[in-house]
Image: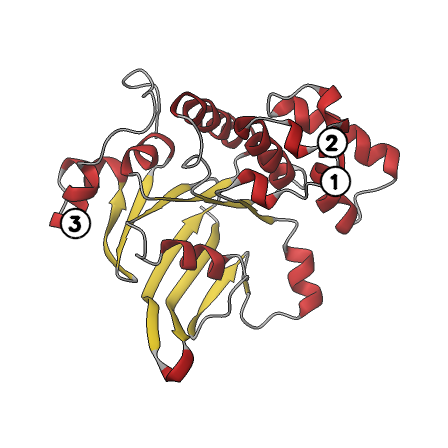
Amino acid sequence: MTVMLEARDLCKTFVGRGGSRVDAVRNVHLRLEAGQSMGLVGESGSGKSTVGRLCLGLLEPTSGSIVFEGRDLTSVSAAEMRRLRSRLQVVFQEPFESLNPRMRVGDVVGEPLVLHGGGRPARVREKVLAMLEQVGLRKELADDYPGDMSGGQQQRVGIARAFITDPTLVVLDEPTSSLDVSVRSQILRLLERLQEERRTAYLFISHDIHTIEYLCSDVVVMQNGAIVESGPVEQVLRAPETAYTQRLMGSRLSFDPPEPGRRTR
C-alpha cells in the first residue's frame, strides 16, 4: 500500500525560561499507510499530542523528519505547505474552542474550501450543505452559530470542516474526550463511516485504549515522549508487553461498545 505519512527519528525539545529543557518527543518513528487507522495512546504528558502537532506541521521538530505524500514537511516552502493542508486536516479535542463563535456554521465548514480555491460561493454553499448532511446535521443549521449548538453538534461541525476538502489524512486529537458517553459512541460511529466511505487515513490520538480498540487497526503506545509498544491492536491488547500498557487497558470503558465482531480489520 501507499505510505501516506512517515515520521522518522522524530524529536521535539522545548526550552523554557532559564534554559530548562523538556524532551517531549524522543526518537519516534511512525508509518501510516493510505486508508489506515493508527491509534496513538498514552497518559497525559506522554507526548502523543505533540507528535500529532508535529505531523500536522504546526510545530517544528528539533530533529527528524515528517514525510507526507512523499514531501518532507520540515523542508517544504510556505506555499507548498498551504497546498498540502487541503489534504492534511485535523479535528480538535474541544469543539467549541476550535470554532469561531462569530462565524455562522456554514462559513466555518466552508472556510477551508474558500482558502484552497474551492470555487464560486454558490458551489461552496452547495458542498457545505451536503457535508453537513453527511455528518448528521440538518442543512438549516448552516445559518446558526456554534454557540447555539450542543457539544456533539459542534464536534460534527468540526468533523465536517475537516472533511470538506476531501483530505487523505485526518489527525484526530482526543475528538470524543470532552463529550458525554452516549455522544462519544455516535461520533465514533460517524468517524468509522466516513473513513469507510472515503478511505481516509486516521491518526487517532487518545488516552483511552478502548476507543483506539474500536476505531483503529494498529496502535502505538507512548510514555514519557517515547514509543514503548506498537503493533496491531488485537495483538497488543491480547498480549501487552509492558506494565504501562496493561495499566492503560485497565481504565474504564468510556463509551457503549459495539456488538462483538462488528468492526473488521
Amino acid residing under circle 2: Val
Dot label at residue 244: 3
Mark 1 lies on a secondary structure that is loop
Q: Please indicate whether residue 167 sits to the left or right of residue 113 in the image.
A: left
Q: Earlier in the sequence, mark 1 or mark 2?
A: 1
Q: Residues within 10 Å of mark 1 (few under 14, many from 20)?
A: some
Dot label at residue 103: 1
Q: Is residue 139 above or below residue 157?
A: above
Q: Earlier in the sequence, mark 2 or mark 3?
A: 2
Q: Residues within 10 Å of mark 2 (few under 14, many from 20)?
A: many
Amino acid residing under circle 3: Tyr
Provide residue 161's location: percent of width, then percent of height. Answer: 64, 39
Mark 3 lies on a secondary structure that is helix
Provide residue 177's location: percent of width, then percent of height. Answer: 40, 37
Name which quarter of the figure residue 118 lies in.
top right
Dot label at residue 128: 2
Q: CA distance from mark 2 to mark 3?
A: 43 Å
